[in-house]
Image (cartoon, helix red, strand yellow):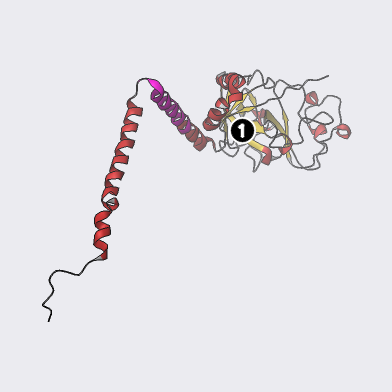
Amino acid sequence: MDGPRSGRPPDGNDDSSAGDGSSIDAPANRGRERSQVRDRLCRLLNADSGPALLVRDVLTVLAIVSVIGLVLFGVSGVWPPMVAIESPSMEPNANVGDMVFLVEEQRFAALSSVDGTGVATHESGLNGEHEQFGKPGDVIVFEPNGDERETPIIHRAHLWVEEGDDWVRMADPDYVGTTNCEIVSSCPAAHDGFITKGDANSHYDQRDPQGMTDVVKPEWIVGKGLIRVPWLGQVRLTLESVLVTGGVVTSLATVAGIATVSDRIRRDP
């Protein structure tokens, strides 16, 4: 007769747990990884030469530019909040290379603004109530004919017209010349909107038979100019002409929210 058995029954898990140290080593591995990451960050932050310094400086610039862009966007309500002027039709009130800070058109609206648009026209501002960049009326940035593929135009809103209006007859004769509604493609107005003109141009954008753009619908407006900073945009334009093929300036400008706009000078016959 067998006597009582001593000991405990074999446990199948004992060998596997004893032979596999992964559960014990995992926390240690994670600790080492965290320590390595901290070491790399310390070297990056404290570097005073070499590639680490370059990487740190680039990241710092990108961070600063991003923060500035976000702050400007919060104030302006439009993206990009700044535009660089590349041609001279708004001279002398906005020159090539100037930087213009934009705001959403409903912000900082004058009492004389057209209802529902936030934009005051040159005509409504002649009483002296509202002036922007040296003349009555708001300066707006808009997509010609509502085409997002076209370079936006920065011109002054001169008058508001409604669908069916013979706006040529309503407009300032000095800026329409001898033309009439019968030969202007945008007359009578096919929809409500603004008649626009560059301050340096002799005629309205919509005056010629084909016109630079149709009557500008409110929804085509990207924003309106609030502040002009002379020559600041020239930095962007100059660097773009040199480095745009590498995509460097375009990328930084996108982060900063700086776009290029044309103010399209009219070449009259």
Residue 169's x, y, as percent? 82, 32
Residue pointed to by mark 1: 224
Residue ID at (42%, 28%): 60
Q: Nearer the viewer, residue 209 or 4?
A: 4
Residue ID at (88%, 32%): 183
Q: Decide whether residue 122 is among the magenta residues.
A: no
Instruction: Look at label 1 and name its amino acid.
Output: Lys
Stretch in magenta: 48-66
Residue 75 visible somewhere in the drawing: yes
Residue 122 visible somewhere in the drawing: no
Q: Nearer the viewer, residue 114 or 101?
A: 101
Please identify the quarter of the rendering in which residue 153 is found.
top right
Question: Under tag 1, what secondary structure?
Answer: strand
Please identify the quarter of the rendering in which residue 231 is found.
top right
**Prevailing secondary structure class for the magenta stretch in the rendered image:** helix
Q: Decide whether residue 58 is among the magenta residues.
A: yes
Residue ID at (53%, 28%): 252
* Above or below 130: residue 27: below
Residue 267's x, y, as percent? 78, 20
Kindly give the residue lying farthest to the front in the view shown: 1
Kindly give the residue lying farthest to the left in the view shown: 3
Tell me: 102 left or right of 196.
Answer: left
Kindly give the residue lying farthest to the bottom in the view shown: 1
Label 1 neighbour load within 10 Å: few <14, some 14-19, many 20+: many
* Above or below 200: residue 187: below
Please identify the quarter of the rendering in which residue 147 is found.
top right
What is the quadrant of the C terminus in the image?
Answer: top right
Residue 261's x, y, as percent? 64, 27
What is the quadrant of the N terminus in the image?
Answer: bottom left
Q: How many marks?
A: 1
